[in-house]
Image (cartoon, rainbow, N blue to C red):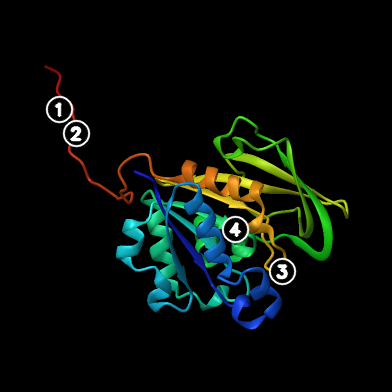
Amino acid sequence: MAPTVTVWNENVHEQEDDAVADIYPDGIHGTIADALADHGFETETATLQDPEHGLTEDVLEETDVLVWWSHIAQDEVEDAVAERVADAVRGGMGLIVLHSAVLSTVFRSLMGTTGTLKWREADERERLWVTEPTHPIAEGVDECIELEPTEMYGEPFDVPTPDSVVFTSWFEGGEVFRSGCCWQRGRGKIFFFRPGHETHPIYHDDDIQRVLANAAEWAAPDGERKLPTLENVEPRERIGDDD
């Protein structure tokens, strides 16, 4: 059975900026969900404007992988919902964090850092280099993906040392950035993927869609989903028995 992916988007730029609406008439979430459906996933969408931001306990229980895109409304996500999502990840739900969602409450909570970085909007060229070609997320991807125009993200990137760095970006202005990073928190797998500024048609790119599909497959739970708990247990063997 195909993993179920919920694509979450704050869905603000599309309603306030005609240029973004022209690129993503069904919203960034709609474009990504359609692409993942084409790759065989069961997809749903949710937005900031939905009750409980569309991320109820039932939705999260039925979601194998959550894709998260946010930018200008990071602070509008209710703390209780953000913690509910973080707990779902710790319990085994996969999480794909896109672009500026590194500043979301969910990502910062799971990382324990600020997620801050350098940035510049100059419509420059990017080469997204595959730096771990044997990783499942890089399957079927050439040695690099060329994107233009893009928004620059640069080091230092305030995150814990990743378990894997699948992609590293070089930008025309000279900066580099760890653009595809993997972590595990509890039972859940997390993938951060940098490309995706709202005024660029990044998520229409076939290579980017391939990476997202690979990431959703990689992040899907491979066992029981269960939040880690504190347990007081009986000893397996008798303690202090000299017999």
- Indicate the position of residue 44 as horizontal and vertical percent values: 42, 62
Few, some or many residues within 10 Å of mark 3 (<14, 14–19, 20+): some
- The CA span between labels 4 and 1 is 51 Å
- The CA span between labels 3 and 1 is 65 Å
Task: Mark 3 and mark 1 in contact? Answer it, CB < 8 Å.
Answer: no
Residue 98 tag number = 4
Task: Mark 1 and mark 2 in contact? Answer it, CB < 8 Å.
Answer: yes
For disc 1, the marked residue is 238
Q: Residue at x 84, y 58 (%)?
A: 124
Question: What's under tag 4, amino acid-wise?
Answer: Leu
Please state which of the two labelled residues, at mark 4 or mark 1, is closer to the viewer: 4
- The CA span between labels 2 and 4 is 45 Å
Mark earlier in primary sequence (4, 1): 4
Label 3 SS: loop
Report whether 45 appears left or right of 202.
Answer: left
For disc 2, the marked residue is 235
